[in-house]
Amino acid sequence: MGIYRKPLFATEQGSIYTYVWNDSFGCQLQWDYLVETSGPGAPRIVILSYRSYQQKTADGSLLLVESIYGDIPISDGILTLLIEHAAKELFRRSAITGSLKRVPANFLDRVDEGATKRFDLSALRVMSQKETAAEAVSNP
């Protein structure tokens, strides 16, 4: 299970975050990383450090096992978790604009089912938008 922390601090390049992974068997892994947004092009994620903690006894507290700044353990799964968190942070600070109209939360499920049954997806979209608008009026 992952836990996300707020930025440790901000730099001129961006904000430094810690991704924390907890295991139910008494260990915790942490990666500090910088989301660099000040340069040209796409934002960069720079992984800065890694720490691991372990519980030596069933009722003991977590103790620092290692804290390293090089040879940081990484895998595709860990990268996915870090990227997911960084994307959430970037999205959280973004303004979403456009000619938008709400649909129900299960819209993608409806589209998947509708496509399977060969329904008219345009009609499904219009119906979904009308349904959401009607709910907004009846539940202000």
Image (tube, rainbow, N blue to C red):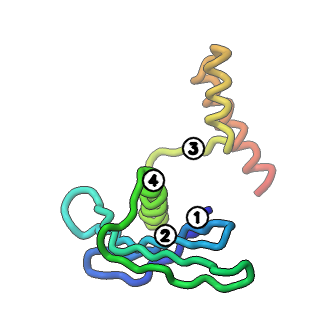
Say which label, 1 or 2, has the lower sequence index: 1
Depth-wise, is mark 3 or mark 1 nearer the camera?
1
What residue sits right under mark 2 in the picture?
19
Q: Pointer 3 and pointer 2: residues touching (CB < 8 Å)?
A: no
Up/down of 28 relative to 76, above or below = below
What residue sits right under mark 4 in the picture?
80
Viewer-side residue, 56 vs 28: 56
Say which label, 3 or 1, has the lower sequence index: 1
Residue 105 coordinates in the image, percent (x, y)? 67, 44
Q: Residues within 10 Å of mark 1 (few under 14, many from 20)?
A: some
Depth-wise, is mark 3 or mark 2 nearer the camera?
2
What residue sits right under mark 1 in the picture?
2
Secondary structure category for the residue under label 1 = strand
State the separation of the CA atoms marked 1 and 2.
7 Å
Q: Which of the 4 image quadrants contains residue 133?
A: top right
Residue 103 coordinates in the image, percent (x, y)? 63, 41
State the separation of the CA atoms marked 1 and 4.
12 Å
What residue sits right under mark 3 in the picture?
101
Which amino acid, mark 4?
Thr
Say which label, 1 or 4, has the lower sequence index: 1
Which amino acid, mark 1?
Gly
